[in-house]
Image (cartoon, rainbow, N blue to C red):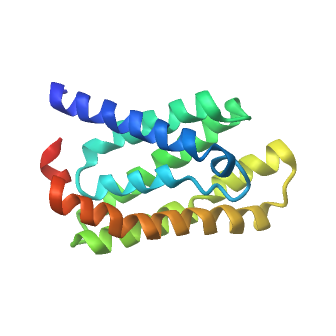
C-alpha cells in the first residue's frame, strides 16, 4: 500500500472518530443519527477509502459505544458489508449521483443489522428499530451526498488517494 493511501485513510479514520465524538448522544441510540456516516459516500469515488471508513467505524465504536462488543461486531460488520456491496456495484452503475443514491439505499437497508444488534442488546422491537435506524441513516446519507459531491469538486476524491 502506498504511503499516501495509508496517510489519507488515517486522516479519514481520525475525521470519522472526531465527528462521531461530537455527536455521541445521537450516534448510539435507536435512531443512529451519526453524521460521520456521510463519509461512506467516499467509496463511490475510490474503493480505497473503505480502509479508512472501516477503521474509523471500528475505533469510534471501540472508544465511544456504550455496548462495545456488540458494536464492534454488528456496526463494523454492517459497514463492511454495505461498503463491499457499493464497491462491487460501481462497475454496473455509472455516474457519481447514481452511485451515491445506490450507496444511500444499501446503507439504509442494511441497518437491519443494527436493529438486530439493538434487539439482542436491549430487546427493542426489531421492525420498529429497523425503521428508526434506517430513517436516521437515510437522512444522514441523503444530506451527506450533496455535501460530499460539493467537496469533491474542490478536492477530487478519486485522485486524492
Outermost residue toward the right in this view: 123
Q: Is residue 143 above or below residue 38?
A: below
Left or right, residue 23 beside residue 96: right
Q: Tell me where residue 100 appears, x and y as whole percent.
A: 35, 67
Q: Residue 38 placed where, x, y %?
A: 43, 56
Depth check, front residue: 78 or 155: 155
Question: At x 70% / y 66%, what residue is drawn?
Answer: 132
Q: Is residue 127 left or right of residue 41?
A: right
In the displayed structure image, the side of residue 62 where residue 86 appears, left or right: left
Question: Where residue 118 sits in the image (x, y, percent)?
Answer: 76, 49
In the picture, the quarter occupied by the N terminus is top left
Residue 13 falls in image quadrant:
top left
Residue 12 versus residue 123 in the image, above or below? above
Check the image and report above or below for 47 versus 88.
above
Looking at the image, which is closer to me, 3 or 156? Answer: 156
Instruction: Assign the C terminus to one quadrant of the image.
Output: top left
Q: Residue furthest left?
A: 159
Please give the name of the residue rendered at 31% of the width and 68% of the height, measured from the top-left corner. 99
Amino acid at each position: 500500500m502506498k504511503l499516501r493511501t495509508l496517510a489519507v485513510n488515517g486522516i479519514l479514520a481520525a475525521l470519522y472518530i472526531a465527528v462521531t465524538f461530537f455527536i455521541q448522544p445521537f450516534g448510539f441510540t435507536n435512531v443512529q443519527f451519526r453524521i460521520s456516516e456521510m463519509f461512506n459516500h467516499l467509496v463511490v469515488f475510490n474503493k480505497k477509502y473503505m480502509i479508512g471508513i472501516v477503521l474509523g467505524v471500528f475505533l469510534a465504536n471501540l472508544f465511544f459505544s456504550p455496548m462495545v462488543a456488540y458494536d464492534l461486531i454488528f456496526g463494523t460488520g454492517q459497514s463492511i458489508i454495505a461498503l463491499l456491496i457499493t464497491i462491487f456495484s460501481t462497475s454496473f452503475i455509472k455516474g457519481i449521483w447514481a452511485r451515491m443514491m445506490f450507496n444511500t439505499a444499501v446503507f439504509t437497508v442494511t441497518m437491519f443489522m443494527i436493529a438486530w444488534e439493538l434487539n439482542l442488546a436491549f430487546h427493542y422491537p426489531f421492525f420498529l428499530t429497523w425503521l428508526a435506524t434506517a430513517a436516521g441513516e437515510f437522512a444522514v446519507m441523503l444530506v451527506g451526498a450533496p455535501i460530499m459531491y460539493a467537496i469533491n469538486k474542490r478536492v477530487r476524491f478519486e485522485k486524492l488517494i
